[in-house]
Image: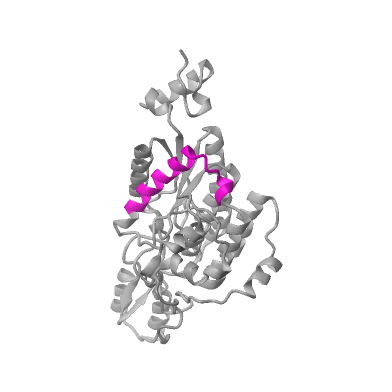
């Protein structure tokens, strides 16, 4: 009697070789009857924002297994923009986006995954993963590794760009060689994406606004335990999406892109995000997201947050002030509230559920005067 499998590539006699190949790696008949979930893990020990992704992947797998799925992990490249700066390496950063997107598309198609979880944190890697998901058009969940904490120096918080400042201070003989070395030691105090609203953190926030991440998760710091709990929940979510037949196109819509654009304009994140959103949009809808259209939206959306490098506030301040959800709450009347997320909840449901957490209007960008960065 033929055993029923969730994934059609394992069905019948024609699926025997594929079942045998998985069994060679220890997979059981029971596991091969369940939804097959790809995990695109861009871990590397050479990029701080991706250093914790193996541990996050373990938690995602726990969630997938608990919810009744079978996880299949594979890797992608993940070059660091900061390390590539200032030499020939920077010429390889944007092309890496295409390689990562293509590797996700290839693995997804070749192995016929029922769904996919995308693990990434930094710069071109995050949009690459979203482009890959847009090509596959299967249920997808994005999980980022989280930002690092800022450096603390001379009674101020700084991101890694304190090094650039310190080079100038040293040339002006405002600091000694010994003090310069001390700054180097504290500049990047832990793992995580850099503690500023650059391309990395901007794109992680946009992944959440597009509905592809657990609400409230984008800015959880890399070293906090909550980051692992979110990973488990994300693993559970991808299986539930498949079981409930929630399609990728139910989540990623033109309305959700409009919300992402409005959020970006309100947050004032990296201008690179426009380039990446246009690419994701083109891959998914086969249409252009024009600068004229973006400009028209910008006329009705004020900038309501100011985050380093635009101000002294870093992304950890942003997280503590409510993160992505605080801006969405402020923008509520301007947003498409019927957009769904990976929990199969509408944006309206999510914002209503915030309750008393945001009792007042957000005043993040003007709650404190911005001081000069004199040393």
Residue 291 placed where, x, y %? Answer: 68, 66
Looking at the image, is 180 positioned above or below residue 12?
A: below
Looking at the image, is 249 positioned above or below residue 308?
A: above
Residue 236 on the magenta span: yes
How many numbered dots are placed on residues in this image?
A: 0
Residue 24 in view (yes/no): no
Residue 252 on the magenta span: no
Q: Is residue 265 left or right of residue 236?
A: right
Query: Foreground: 343 or 160?
Result: 343
| Applied colour scheme | one colour
Q: Is residue 90 left or right of residue 239?
A: right
Looking at the image, is 138 positioned above or below residue 298?
A: above
Image quarter (top left, top right, bottom left or bottom right) of the C terminus: bottom left
Query: Foreground: 339 or 297?
Result: 339
Looking at the image, is 313 positioned above or below residue 13?
A: below
Residue 203 placed where, x, y %? Answer: 51, 60
**Can you tell which quarter of the image residue 31 is in?**
top left
Q: Is residue 13 left or right of residue 167?
A: right
Residue 278 placed where, x, y %? Answer: 63, 59
Q: Is residue 129 left or right of residue 174?
A: right
Q: Residue at x 64, y 50 (%)?
A: 283
Residue 320 placed where, x, y %? Answer: 35, 70
**Can you tell which quarter of the image residue 297 is in?**
bottom right
Residue 1 in view (yes/no): yes
Q: Which residues are magenta?
A: 228-251
Q: Residue at x 63, y 72 (%)?
A: 298
Q: Residue at x 33, y 46 (%)?
A: 59
Instruction: State the predominant SS element of the stretch in magenta.
Output: helix
């Amino acid at each position: 009697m033929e055993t029923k499998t969730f994934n059609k590539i394992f069905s019948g006699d024609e699926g025997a070789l594929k079942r045998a190949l998985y069994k060679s790696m220890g997979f059981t008949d029971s596991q091969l009857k369940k939804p097959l979930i790809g995990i695109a893990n861009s871990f590397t020990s050479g990029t701080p924002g991706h250093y914790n992704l193996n541990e996050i992947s373990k938690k995602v797998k726990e969630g997938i297994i608990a919810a009744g799925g079978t996880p299949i992990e594979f890797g992608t490249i993940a070059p660091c923009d900061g390390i590539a700066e200032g030499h020939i390496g920077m010429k390889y950063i944007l092309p890496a986006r295409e390689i990562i997107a293509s590797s996700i598309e290839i693995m997804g198609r070749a192995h016929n995954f029922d769904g996919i979880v995308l693990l990434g944190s930094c710069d071109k890697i995050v949009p690459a993963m979203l482009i890959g998901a847009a090509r596959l058009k299967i249920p997808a969940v994005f999980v980022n590794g989280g930002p690092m904490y800022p450096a603390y120096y001379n009674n101020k918080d700084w991101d890694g760009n304190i090094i650039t400042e310190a080079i100038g201070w040293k040339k002006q003989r405002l600091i000694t060689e010994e003090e310069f070395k001390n700054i180097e030691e504290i500049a990047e105090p832990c793992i995580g994406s850099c503690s500023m609203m650059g391309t990395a953190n901007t794109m992680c926030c946009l992944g959440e606004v597009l509905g592809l991440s657990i609400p409230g998760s984008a800015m959880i710091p890399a070293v906090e335990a909550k980051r692992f709990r979110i990973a488990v929940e994300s693993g559970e979510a991808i299986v539930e999406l498949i079981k409930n037949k929630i399609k990728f196109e139910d989540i990623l819509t033109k309305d959700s892109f409009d919300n992402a654009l409005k959020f970006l304009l309100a947050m004032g994140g990296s201008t690179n995000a426009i380039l990446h959103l246009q690419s994701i949009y083109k891959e998914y809808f086969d249409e252009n997201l024009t600068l004229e259209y973006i400009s028209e939206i910008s006329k009705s959306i004020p900038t309501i947050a100011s985050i380093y490098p635009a101000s002294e506030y870093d992304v950890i301040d942003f997280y503590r002030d409510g993160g992505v959800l605080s801006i969405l709450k402020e923008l509520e009347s301007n947003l498409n509230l019927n957009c769904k997320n990976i929990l199969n909840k509408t944006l309206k449901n999510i914002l209503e559920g915030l309750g008393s957490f945001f009792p007042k209007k957000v005043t993040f960008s003007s709650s404190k005067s911005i001081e000069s960065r004199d040393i």
